[in-house]
Image (tube, rainbow, N blue to C red):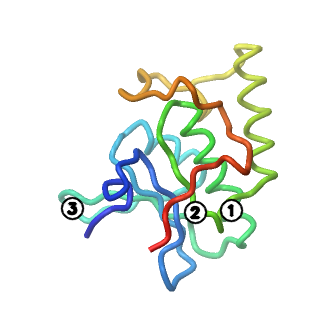
Amino acid sequence: MSFLHEEYGTDVEIYRKPFSNEVIADCSDPRAHEVLVACGFVKKTVPPHYVWHQLPDGLSEEEQAQRATRAACLLRARGFDANVAEDLVSVEAVTAVRDEVRRQRISGAATSASPTVGPGAPPARPDATASAAPAASSISTHRSR
């Protein structure tokens, strides 16, 4: 079993499993796992080494796109290199998350329960040039196979 984030050299990859409706998010940083769970992803494991997240069954394609986009934007706001598949990008979710992150940064009202902030230090490789929530056209998408 291999993970796309390892193959592409990123922190997080969010994509639809080929020939399936399953939306998968793979990463290795525990702080990224927290954001994924807060966005509705369910942690899956195959001991001892494999951990990934998956959206629950039964969600509409629009709900999948909203959750995947929200997760990618919040992860990027925390400094992670997070990519989301093009078919999972929701322009509405990008706008909503960008506004939420800006409001919380301006007001300082973010709480530890919010996935936009957390108790841990930022990841080792923060991208200081990236915006908190990229415009829909600039969301990084993973490469097609």
Q: CA distance from mark 3 to mark 1?
A: 29 Å
Task: State the residue at coordinates (53%, 52%).
Answer: 83
In the rendered image, the vertical position of residue 19 relative to residue 136, given as above or below = below
Q: Is residue 50 left or right of residue 123?
A: left
Q: Is residue 132 left or right of residue 10?
A: right
Q: Secondary structure at mark 3?
A: loop
Image coordinates for residue 96, horizontal then vertical, percent: 79, 42
- Which residue is identified by label 3? 47
Image quadrant in which you'd find residue 86:
bottom right
Image coordinates for residue 9, horizontal then vertical, percent: 35, 49
Which of discs 3 and 1 lies nearer the camera? The answer is 1
Image coordinates for residue 117, horizontal then vertical, percent: 57, 26
Check contact, mark 3 vs mark 2: CB within 8 A: no
Q: Is residue 140 left or right of residue 145?
A: right
Q: CA distance from mark 2 to mark 1?
A: 9 Å
- Which residue is identified by label 1? 65
- Residue type highlighted by circle 3: Pro
Q: Secondary structure at mark 1?
A: helix
- Which residue is identified by label 2? 85
N-terminal label among 2 and 1: 1
Task: State the residue at coordinates (46%, 55%).
Answer: 13
- Residue type highlighted by circle 2: Ala
N-terminal label among 3 and 1: 3
Task: State the residue at coordinates (44%, 49%).
Answer: 12
